[in-house]
Image (cartoon, rainbow, N blue to C red):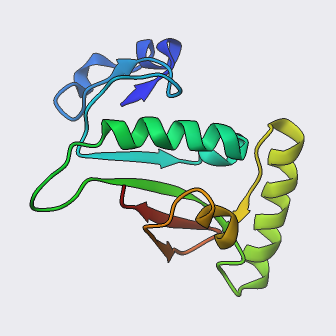
Amino acid sequence: MLDLPHVINSIASDHSDVAQFVAGDMMDFNLKADAVLLKSVLHDWSDEDCIKILKCCKEAIIPSKDAGGKIIIIDVVVGSSSEAICQGTQHLVDLNISVLTPGKERDEEEWFKMFTKYKISPVLGFRSIIKVFP
């Protein structure tokens, strides 16, 4: 797990058997992993910064003969649900994000501009799982 130093320092040390915890910057890290998980991360960033983050993630993926490495993104895909309550929530979250950060919630076309080999799986609620195959 890569996060800012103050976050990593606050994690109880008894979780070291589950994952490796590393303090660092997601814009500049040098780790190797079978997969990278970004949950509610990319919507905080501009398209340009998202591409930088995704490039770092791609460099971190260890190629595997059996199952290729992947980047797993859990985030909003605007319009992925036909349920009115989900659509309303997606738009409210987008408004909140655009006021607080340089980011935004993206629809599938906007996600497609950042990567081409991917699969979007809508899940219960207003978020989706996006699997990117670098």
Furthest residue to the left?
A: 66
Where residue 17 sits: x, y (%)?
A: 16, 29
Question: Residue 105 sits in which quadrant?
Answer: bottom right
Give me the residue at 26% from left, 53% from top. 69
Residue 132 picture location, percent across and down: 42, 60
21 up-or-down from 77: above or below: above
Which residue is nearer to you in this view: 12 or 100?
100
Q: Please tell me which residue is depicted at 53% across the width and 37% down the height of the picture.
A: 53
| Nearer to me, 9 or 59 | 59
Choose top left, top right, bottom left or bottom right for residue 36. top left
Relative to 83, is 134 on the left or the right?
A: left
Q: Is residue 72 above or below residue 88?
A: above
Residue at x 23% of width, y 45% of height: 34
Q: Tell me the quadrant of the picture where the C terminus can be found.
A: bottom left
Residue at the farthest bottom position: 82
Classify the position of the N terminus by image quarter: top left
117 or 108: nearer the eye?
A: 117
Task: Give the residue displayed 61% in from the left and 43% down from the top.
Answer: 50
Residue 7 at what x, y percent from top left?
Answer: 50, 19
Q: Position of residue 106 (x, y in %)?
A: 71, 61
